[in-house]
Image (cartoon, helix red, strand yellow):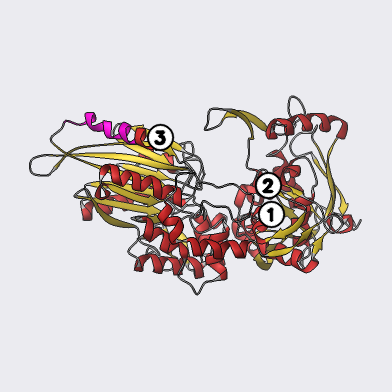
Amino acid sequence: MKRIIISFVLLLGMAHLLPAQSQRTIHLVTTGDVHGSWFSEPYVEGQKTRTSLMSVKHYVDSLRLAVGPDNVLLLDAGDALQGDNAAYYYNYVVPEKPHLFTLIAKYMGYDVLVMGNHDIETGHSVYDRESFELGFAGIPYLGGNAVWAKSGKPYFPVYTIVKKAGLRIAVLGFNNTYIKNWVSEDLWKGMDFKNLLPYVQECVNEVNGVENPDVTIVAVHSGTGDGDGTQLENQALDLFNSLNGVDVLVGAHDHAIYVKNDNGKCYVNGGARAGYVGHCAINVQLDNRKRIEGKAAQAEVVRLDKNLVDETMVNLFRSDFEEVKAFTNRKVGALDMPLYIRDAYKGMCDYVNLVHTVQIAAKEAQISFAAPLSFNGTVKQGDVVFNDMFTIYPYENQMVVARLKGSEIRNYLEYSYDSWICAPGEHVLKIHEETDRNGRLRWSFDGRNYNFDSAAGLVYTVDVTKPFGQRVAIKSLADGSSFGPDAWYNVAMTSYRANGGGGLIREGAGISAKEMNERIIAKYPEIRDLIYNYISEHGTVTKADVNNSAVIGSWSFIPEETVAPIMEADMAKLFRK
């Protein structure tokens, strides 16, 4: 409780920024990228408790008690419906029930919710239902840059007016510009997504002109970025540096906490999975006629304590938690070996080979592309329960099979490995040392591990001593037949990758989005479901099952005598051996 009290005192102390006449303060609390972290208790025995929306509820109620509930506005900036067992269960397993997130959001007193790209990834059946339920519960679900493809009119509301502290507050909400580059069209069929620049400013101008609000808040499910206009995925700083008529900007998507206070305006990104919340105090000074004379907003990010939860909320949703827990612990099958995701960074491993084996089993597929999807997950040897499926495959990506030329496949792999490895010297992995949010030094990859694709169905090597463009040497297909640069092959990959995610198709293989869409010859269900079926049908998956070289081929970093010692040292740094 001490941390929260200190936070309140610091922000309440902002009163000196404005002369005291008639002053009102709105406290904005923000979450984002919650990814289904609704419960603090673990689903599986032996796992640790975590921060969750139950931690957020404790914090926001403490703030409401300190400053008055009418002075607190609670907002989520997107990606709440995907990424955890509970979200999956209520999205797909029991769609006939009221969605649990609606009930939780209503109980917590959310004033506004914004859609994220992973919310769109759940598909029309989920987010359309959720939009209806939330609207019925009186909670606006905003996504103003998602428009009807034919008419150009907003598919979701652009804004809402919230009344707090006797003031009228306009809250505008927008999704990510880049959705069409990640998510299959069937999941957003009928929609288009406008670039946040200049669309957000146009919307702000219209809303401010029509509504004349006392305070204007914009929330975007877009990462912070560098503010240089080069990252369509992360446009928050671009907006903060250019928007007029906005008091507070809220960002999300990149899972990275960030605060910027500038001349009475502020930007805040509260990170992911309810580990932190953003907290903005907006002071509004009124004259004797209740007209605004001045405004000043200041933001901070507050670390939540996983041990401080709303006990009433815990008890209220206990039966829902137990229902999800029972589903989560349902046995799927077994493994006769453990899966260590970290092993994927140094070569072939059982984890990625399992994904490759499942993907290349598609009747159309000859080759598979796959990457490690979490930094350092582990699935133990023995029984596999449904909870393990989220470690093996945390995303709701569908699988597609597309036609690629041999030269495009090689260029794709060159691009992938260039984001991952460097010429041997001090390192062979592209890593750097940085200070984490607790002030401790740690080693991290320069790039995103979920873009470190390898291939199955081929026999090839990656020579780390050679420059980009000359590292990948493909000897043959897995069955020994020849591989040619001008020949065409059927390649299984995620829908995220096929739609341009990570740039491997566009920048690596050199295939435009339009052309790639024309090359897709087959679409399959979500890859997690395919892996689930594979394990379930096999009963026990053995090491031999996922290491059949006649099916998945082989690859390795060379020269081994050069790579091995440096790789071992890099891995020790990354994982603090």
Numbered circle sitting on residue 202: none
**Picture quarter with the C terminus:** top right
Q: Which residues are magenta?
A: 8-19
Compare marks 3 and 1 and give the one earlier in the sequence. 3
Under mark 2, the amino acid is Gly
Looking at the rendered image, the disc whose residue lies closer to the viewer, 3 or 1, is: 3
- Would you say the residues marked 2 and 1 are in contact, meaning their CB atoms lie under 8 Å apart? yes
Alpha carbon separation for disc pair 3 and 1: 36 Å
Under mark 1, the amino acid is Ile
Q: Which residue is mark 2?
A: 377
Q: Which residue is mark 1?
A: 392
Element type at mark 3: helix
- Identified at 34% across, 48% down, the residue is 61
**Picture quarter with the N terminus:** top left
Circle 3 packing at 10 Å, graded few (<14), some (14-19), many (20+), is few
Element type at mark 2: loop
Res 136 → quadrant: bottom left
Looking at the rendered image, the disc whose residue lies closer to the viewer, 2 or 3, is: 3
